[in-house]
Image (spheres, rainbow, N blue to C red):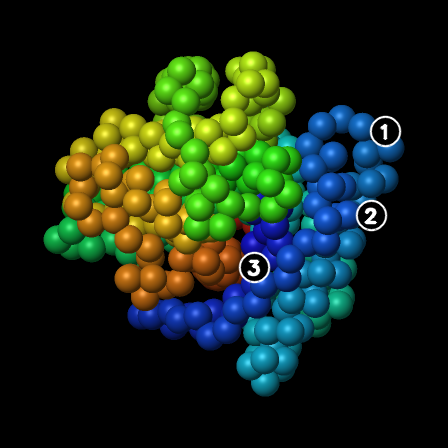
Amino acid sequence: MSGTSLDGIDAVLVAFSDTASHLIQSVYHPYPEELRQQLLALHTPSDNELHTCAVVSSDLARRYASAVNELLFKCSISAKAVTAIGVHGQTIRHQPDAGYTIQLNNPSLLTELTGITSIADFRSRDIAAGGQGAPLVPAFHAAMFQHPERHRVIVNIGGISNLTNLPLSGNTIGFDCGPGNLLMDAWCLKHAGHPYDKNGDWAKSGVVISELLQKLLSHSFFQQLPPKSAGRENFNLPWLMQFLSGNERPEDVQATLLELTVKSIAEAISKHCSGAEEIYLCGGGARNGTLLSSMQKTLSIQHVAPTDELGVDADWLEAFAFAWLARQTSLGLAGNLPAVTGAKHPCILGAIYPV
């Protein structure tokens, strides 16, 4: 998995049976800054972008293969023992209203380099069926974390935040809430020179600018009803900059961006997850102590904790989810939830690139 944060590659090796699953090993490969800048540039139209996309796709496939091979080496497992690689690819455009989403990847090359069947392009089929193509992880959350007696909500805070509502009865629903770490990371890099605000310490040193927060929360995305999904097309630095005078202290803007993430998640839970008893966080935001503390203060729900408490490390949950989605594909089972994405029907997701 390589997500909207553009920080790098999460790779996990997962063993599945009919009754259980467990994570065997994990590795993380950070993106070099040059690649990160190439990917950022591809989010907007540019010269010769088709050639650049093709070159970067092959570069990503080589990096994915390196992560896979390191996993196998660490576990002393041969490629022949692995059923498939589920690879999400790197999103550079997400335009479901225009009927497409683009994740850069070269799964044919990945299969060639690893000797393992690759399963990719998970989002396109859902969009073809009238859905948003995102979020896809709620089906996995339901399979892993549904509880017969506790109403849970799983909140993934990556570049974009999304939630999955797991009520005791009725449909599982899920949707993107708004910016997760995306704006905080970009602002931190611009003004503090760090790719992210470790533990939210810089944000903690600032003061929330109430007027700015209200302007940011006025974005039309927050008023939309689910199903809905978001990306860098919706939330980015140029969008933020239009609301700034230039006289704000950078740490106060950072504090406000953290509060934007918290408030948008809290309001989504309040509006759409009535009766929730437990909130579990995953993704990079689950390791932001300032954000976690603010979530606990903002929500009326007492139990807010990382998914580690449920037996799955919050850092690796999304990569785990795409292993699960690849297994669904290989078994000929649907991987989407129409109530989440808005698709007309359940779909078998992904394209298979066999050995």
Q: CA distance from mark 3 to mark 1?
A: 30 Å
In the picture, the disc for residue 47 is 1
Q: CA distance from mark 3 to mark 2?
A: 21 Å
Residues packed near mark 3 inside 10 Å, few (<14), some (14 to 19) or many (20 plus): many
* Marks 3 and 2, the one that precedes in the sequence: 3
Residue bearing the label numbered 2: 55
In the picture, the disc for residue 37 is none
Is 91 located above or below residue 87 in the figure? above
Q: CA distance from mark 1 to mark 2?
A: 14 Å
Seen from the viewer's position, the closer of residues 81 and 348 is: 81
Q: Are dots 1 and 2 in contact, CB under 8 Å?
A: no
x and y, in percent, of residue 54 in the image: 80, 45
Q: Are dots 3 and 1 in contact, CB under 8 Å?
A: no
Residue bearing the label numbered 3: 10
Residues packed near mark 1 inside 10 Å, few (<14), some (14 to 19) or many (20 plus): few
Is 138 located above or below residue 145 in the figure? above
Going by the numbered disc 3, the residue's amino acid type is Asp
Q: Are dots 3 and 2 in contact, CB under 8 Å?
A: no
Position of 270 compared to 215: left or right? left
